[in-house]
Amino acid sequence: MRMAELSAASGVPVATVKYYLREGLLQPGERTSPNQARYGDDHVQRLKLIRALLDVGGLSVATVGEVLAAVDSHAPTHKVLGLAQNVLVGSAKGVDEESRAWALDVVADLAARHGWKAEPESPTVAALVLTLCTIRDLAQAHDGLLARLDDYATLADRTAEVDLDTVTSLPSLDRIVEATVIGTVLGDRLFSALRRLAQSAESARRFLPQRG
Amino acid sequence: MRMAELSAASGVPVATVKYYLREGLLQPGERTSPNQARYGDDHVQRLKLIRALLDVGGLSVATVGEVLAAVDSHAPTHKVLGLAQNVLVGSAKGVDEESRAWALDVVADLAARHGWKAEPESPTVAALVLTLCTIRDLAQAHDGLLARLDDYATLADRTAEVDLDTVTSLPSLDRIVEATVIGTVLGDRLFSALRRLAQSAESARRFLPQRG
DNA sequence: CCGGAATGGATAGTGAAGCTCTCCGTTATG
DNA sequence: CATAACGGAGAGCTTCACTATCCATTCCGG
């Protein structure tokens, strides 16, 4: 398969494929001459994954590069997931030390109650801290939301169980990390859409007059 | 409060405040002269909300403008939430008709089983359709994930109940829509971080050797 | 085996987004 | 009354994700 065919098979323009090659998102094809290369089905698959992470997952090209590099290097799964979480974080800038300490405390408590391991340096914890600080600063639904953190955490536990069931039901252990990345990034989008539909229905159930 | 103080109080640079004024995200201050204005605490609050939606929520300036306009116009809550969902959608371009029909079918079934109302034109359904089509196209965890859609939907129902509990526990009905927006946008980030931590713990529980 | 098309690779350019800078004439302030 | 800050408008800047143009080399149909 050559460039034009790869482009046709994946739906990604030739110029864009070249760009992904330059950025290291896509591994170079197998050389057949000093300046010719051949591509395979795995390149098509990889391109689809890249587009999914970019378009649906909303990751940046740089983040996709890091995630894919981690996937290819057979890094531990949790590390890859942490990188995928980088969607939003950017180092939690602009949070003052007092808020940060408070949030870390909240997270530590929560983690202890739910048997989680919350390392303060992980991107996930950073994201959580930033979100908690922002909620606190906005103050609107502050205590109400914090009082229900445990409820959310319990639901997160259940969701994670389903996530792991999904992943472990996969046949090929080879692409399991890749599938986990897909599940994580697209799973977030999926769940947030489902949650919105459920909110709508629940809201109607509570506030609209009963019929029937 | 004048421009410089507003900037100091909110942590947003003067030039950026002016930019948000131009874009209509922030309502103009109260005029004290033909070309002087005064700002209040609500402007500070609004600026914090804008930054939260931009930085943590990841919405675009244009989307924030639409969401805030909807909030200010006392539009129905579900409409405001639909707008906030626009984070990712962009019209679900590039999905062929067959995939689209399949996904709509899946969503309709799911909605029927869970008592949801899924209008095909809503941004939420569009987001769901795009995500489902992408998952199907990637094929990796395809059937495994689809087989567990109902599980996720059930968890989404539970989450929505907690969401509604949080919102209805608020005292001031005035800012309830605003609080709902915050809860929705930041709630997604919050839940996804919790889910990641829970996944990590669950993964360790299943795959690491027991200790103790 | 020859000539036009396609290829890999490099460099430069494009357009959108989100600010940021500079001016300007006016107005508050010590 | 000087000077600093103000509101407002426009242009400029930077980053990001592509996209377009070149070029020398290589493939491929006749």
Image (cartoon, coloured by chain):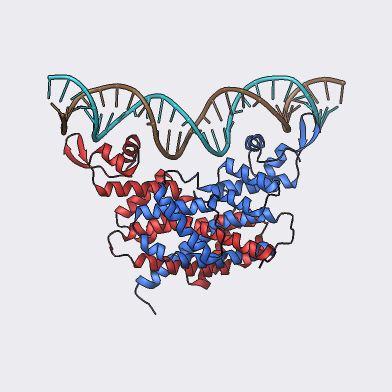
Chain colours: A blue, B red, C brown, D cyan
Residue B29 position (above or below residue B75): above
**Residue B102 visible, this angle:** no
* Position of residue A92 measured from the top left corner of the image (x, y, whole percent): 47, 46
In this rendered view, identify the residue nearer to me: A49 or A76.
A76
Please identify the quadrant where the C terminus of chain A is shown. bottom left
Q: Disc count in the image?
A: 0
Left or right relative to B195: residue A15: right
In this rendered view, identify the residue nearer to me: A153 or B90.
A153
Q: Residue B168 occupies which quadrant of the picture?
A: bottom left
In this rendered view, identify the residue nearer to me: A17 or A164.
A164
Toward the front, the furthest residue is B212
Residue drawn at (60%, 59%), measured in percent from left and top? B200
Residue drawn at (47%, 57%), measured in percent from left and top? B190
Q: Residue A142 occupies which quadrant of the picture?
A: bottom left
Residue B150 position (above or below residue B124): below
Toward the bottom, the furthest residue is A212
* Position of residue B111 measured from the top left corner of the image (x, y, whole percent): 51, 68
In this rendered view, identify the residue nearer to me: A75 or A169.
A75
* Position of residue C23 measured from the top left corner of the image (x, y, whole percent): 29, 21
Please identify the quadrant where the N terminus of chain A is shown. top right
* Position of residue A34 measured from the top left corner of the image (x, y, whole percent): 79, 29
**Residue B180 visible, this angle:** yes
